[in-house]
Structure formats: C-alpha cells, structure tokens
Image (spheres, rainbow, N blue to C red):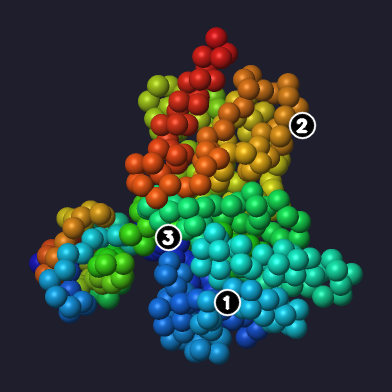
Amino acid sequence: MLDQQTNERRLTIARAMAEAMAQEMRRDPSVFVMGEDIGPFGGIFGNTRGLIDEFGKDRVRDTPISETGFISAAVGAAMDGMRPVVELMFVDFFGVCFDAIYNQMAKNTYFSGGNSSVPMVLMTSTGGGYSDAGQHSQCLYGTFAHLPGMKVVSPSNAYDAKGLMTAAIREDNPVVYMYHKGLQGMGWLGTEPGATVHTPEEDYVVEIGKAKVVREGSDVTLVGLAMGVHNALKAADKLAEDGVSAEVVDLVSLVPLDRETVRASVAKTGRLIVVDEDYHSYGVTGEIIATVCEHDIGKLKAAPARVAFPDVPIPYARNMEQFCLPNADKIVAAYRAMQKAEG
Amino acid sequence: MATDVTVPTDLWEGDLEAVITNWLASDGQAVKQGALLAEIMVEKSQFEVTAPADGTLTITQAADAIVRKGDTIGRIG
C-alpha cells in the first residue's frame, strides 16, 4: 500500500482515465482507443491526453463525426478479438447511433448463442451545470441501464475512475462507462474538488457491480452516483450541523446494480432519499426506491423521496438550469419534508 | 531557502488571464522537483505547473483563483 502522507498522488478523473487506458494498452496489444478528437487534442474532456504520443495513430484513432460508423466498427473489432475503447463524445448524441449500441453491441453475445463476445468499452460524457443546453447536458443513466446486455458504470472520483476503466477494458462484456463532465477537473465544466483524490500509480481494478458506503450514518440513507454523490456528501455535512446522521451510498455501477448494499443501509437507517441528475420519471431514483420497497417495506420509517432533474428539456439559461439541477439544499429540504410527514 | 511556485510565462501567447483549475498536490506536502503540482486553464486549454525545487509545498493561491503569467501561486520551503 502506498503511504498517502508521503506519497500522495492526486489525479483528476480525466488523468485517471487516461492512465488506466495507457496501462492496459501497454499490457494488452489488442486494446485501442477510437473517437472524435481523442488523438492530438487529447479528448475534449482531457481523458485521452498523452495516448497518441505513446501509442501512435493506429492505436489511438481519430474518427470523423460518424458515430454509427465508428461504434459499429468497434463492435466488429471486438467480436474479432480486439478490445476497443470507443468514445461517444456526449451521451446526448446517442440518437444517431443507438442501433449500433443496443442492437449490436448489447445483444450480439446473446444473438450468437454465446459464440461471440463483445469486449468493448463505450465511454461517454454525461451531466450539465455549465450552460451547454439540452443536447449536451443530459445524464441518460436510466436509458442505458434499462436495456439488457450492457454493464453500466459511472465514477464519482479519480480512484474509482481508474479502477473502473481498468475493469471495463478487461471485461468480456460491453461496458458503458459514463463520466460526468463536472467531475473531470477541466475547469470550464465546473470544478468539484472532491473528485480529485489520491490515485495509486500501479494498476488495480474497482469491481463493477459493487456499491460503496462513502459516509456512515444512522438516520437517513442518501443514494446517488457520480455528481449525485458529491451533492449527497454536502447535504450530509449540512444535516450533521443539525444533529442528523446521514449515510451516503455511491452506487458506482448501475448494471449490475448492488441492491444488497442499498437495502442493508436502509435497513439500518429506515429512511431513503435518492439523488439523480437524470430525469425524475422512469429512472434510477424509481429503481432504487422499488429495490427497497419490494424487498421489505417494514424497514421504512417514512415514505422514500427522490431529488432528480425535473421532466423537462435541460435549459440553456444558467439561472433556469441551476434551478432544475439537484443540489445539497434540495436534499436537506427532502429530509425536512420527510420529518414533517412523520410528525 | 524558499522557492516561489510561479505561473510559467511561456505556455500561451499574449496577456490572457488563467484560472487554477486543480491543485494536484496538497498544502504541506513534500514534493520533488519536476512533480506535477497544479493545472491552470486559459480559454478551455489546460497547462501544467511543476515543482521548481524539492521541499514542502505551501499553497498561496487556491483553486479557482484568477492568475496571470509570473504570478506566485505557492512556495516550496
């Protein structure tokens, strides 16, 4: 183990992702990276910086703006023995290439009766908060997690970002790796200092499908992923000032979903608030609440609550977008409403 | 003797302001010369600030601070 006091090594998520890809490319010649502006530019979110200098343009391939073409090509390459990491620059652009993603990438293992696997990573940026409007700011976690055949992960910090990328590249099933732009450490996308954490240099794996209790508490469970974890941690700080002890669960993965960790936490606290930057309806928040309710409703001391993005297109105007986004104050207000309902 | 950590003067053209986007080393941490200390951004481009000497880092300009070429953002003593 590294001694964090004397060998601290803080990385942004952008750097952690690039480091994991570089290490796997050194280890395994079948790994290559493909996408728009991922070569000399280093990715518009910084997550492929330095790769083309070390590995050259055959293994770090800049593509035209033709997502259907290059994501389909990645599926074919994966089925033919390669391990592509392919980038869909903004998840919002899935509309032009979803056949490649959910009819080919997600299903070809099943369609082939298990004779072919599709060991590829689709990395894609999510989230808003920096006024980039409704076609560059969505999360769409529920959209991807809903469809069978793909693993889905979304890190909240650089340590998990590196270990999840390494795990995703080594995984024989397709993995959708969703990284939140506001956690990348890129400045112009907003800055969340809590995402830039100590990250070991040696390679390691963060298990896909395992949630983490990132703060222990006894009065209420706050469940989130990616930016939602940071909102929940800030809410937990505010609640603590009033003597309320909040536990925070970082889902880390949506598929497979670690329902046991969520249920164990709610069994302890009896109260559940789910935080999600994806839309309110038909999404992660409803799935987490159902996970608890269909298991043992007797554990709940209050009706669960959700703090999510309202069911409207994401506004461009800063004041309107900020009004819609989840934040710590909304989580605290949800807890207060829960207390009031309990009497 | 302490050495100032300054914003390099040769990373970008003109007299544009920059913002410290991330400190990748902590206040009070022992650092080695050449280690990556911070990232600064100018018009969506990121640049690196590295340690000019071995020693203990003191951060004098926090993340989100607006800086210019040559500004002192920390000290290594």
Looking at the rendered structure, the kind of residue marked 1 is Ser
Dot 3 alpha-carbon crowd within 10 angstroms: few under 14, some 14 to 19, many 20 or more: many
Q: How many discs appear?
A: 3
Q: Are marks 3 and 2 on the same chain?
A: yes
Q: Which residue bears the numbered disc 1?
A: A66
Q: Chain of mark 1?
A: A
| Residue A102, image quadrant | bottom right
Mark seen at residue B12: none
Q: Chain of mark 2?
A: A
Q: Helix, strand or loop at disc 1?
A: loop
Residue A188 found in image quarter: bottom left
- Please identify the quarter of the rendering in which residue A260 is found: top right
Q: Nearer the viewer, residue A276 or A241?
A: A276
Q: Is residue A177 something one can see in this rendering?
A: yes
**Can residue A171 be seen in the rendering of this structure?**
no
Note whether A289 is above or below B42 in the view shown.
above
Residue shown at 56%/86% (left/top)?
A59
Q: Earlier in the sequence, mark 3 or mark 1?
A: 1
Q: Residue at x 67, y 72 (%)?
A: A120
Distance from the alpha carbon under mark 2 to that under mark 1: 44 Å
Badge 1 crowding class, 10 Å Cα cut-off, few under 14, some 14 to 19, many 20 or more, is few
- Note whether A160 is above or below B7 in the view shown: above
The residue labelled by disc 2 is A295
Q: How far apart, in angstroms, are the residues tagged by discs 3 and 2?
A: 36 Å
Q: Nearer the viewer, residue A145 or A320?
A: A320
Which residue is nearer to you in this view: A341 or B58? A341
Q: Which residue is mark 3?
A: A184
- Classify mark 2: helix, strand or loop: loop
